[in-house]
Image (cartoon, grey):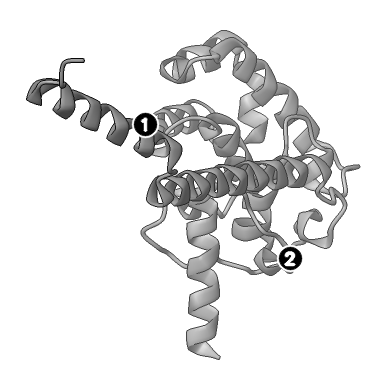
Amino acid sequence: MESPTVDEVEERSNSNKVKRRKRKPNLVDEEEDEEKDAKKKKKLAEKKRSLLSATYFNKLDEAYKRKTEDNTWKPPKSEFGFLHKHAHDPWRILVICMLINRTAGTRAEKVVTDLFTLCPDAKAATEVTEEEIERAIKSLGLQRRRSKMIQRFSRDYLGEDWTHVTLLHGVGKYAADAYAIFCTGKWERVRPNDHMLNHYWEFLRSTKNALS
């Protein structure tokens, strides 16, 4: 029987090494995979909590009560967004939230200016046509749906019978939390899901801690 050549011996050796590598798990790779899985699970859990919070938040919480005339809260200025510039009129805060929800805030700022030039308050918003509002907000998309929402919300807002902002048409958790933060000053009673609102919420908390 002929002895194997040097090349054959080397080939068998390499083959055996490959088999051994396949049989022996790479602990580093396993740890990395476990870490990735853990991150995925954490991300999914956070998303689930966020969705549950958005769905089941207490709509009749004190933070969302109608602002009274003796409430003199003025949110401090900050570098986070532009909502605080319109805090003198809760209607504006809520309309802005309807427009910038799922839209970049920087992109919406000019549109907001154009809209409030057309209708500076809730009463004016009910007096212009839907088509006029559509033209003002067209660049943000969904202009027809949003135009109808703004007019219906504005009619509700002008009513005297609502007790909590969450009872108004089109107001979800995002807008309600913004209302609590910028209008009623009950920011400590809410925990927003939106990252920009969270930035401002953290800013308020750090300011309060610095003053206390």
Q: Which mark is residue 189?
A: 2
Question: Which-is-in-front pick, marks 2 and 1?
Answer: 1
Please state which amino acid type lies under the numbered disc 2: Arg
**Mark 1, residues whose alpha carbon is within 10 Å: few (<14), some, or many (≥20)?**
few
Label 2 or label 1, whichever comes before in sequence order: 1
Q: Residue at x 22, y 30 (%)?
A: 14
Element class at badge 1:
helix
- Looking at the image, which is closer to me, 148 or 26? 26
Please state if 50 lies on the left or on the right of 82 as rendered.
right
Could you tell me which quadrant the N terminus lies in?
top left
Q: Is residue 63 left or right of residue 174?
A: right
Location of residue 31 with respect to 173 vertically, above or below? below
Residue neighbourhood size for the residue with mark 2, other residues' Cα within 10 Å, grouped as few (<14), some (14–19), many (≥20): some
Please name the residue that numbered disc 1 is placed on. 19
In this view, 146 is above or below 42:
above
Return the x and y of residue 121 as percentages of the image width and height. Answer: 60, 36
The residue lying at 65 percent from left, 20 percent from top is 127
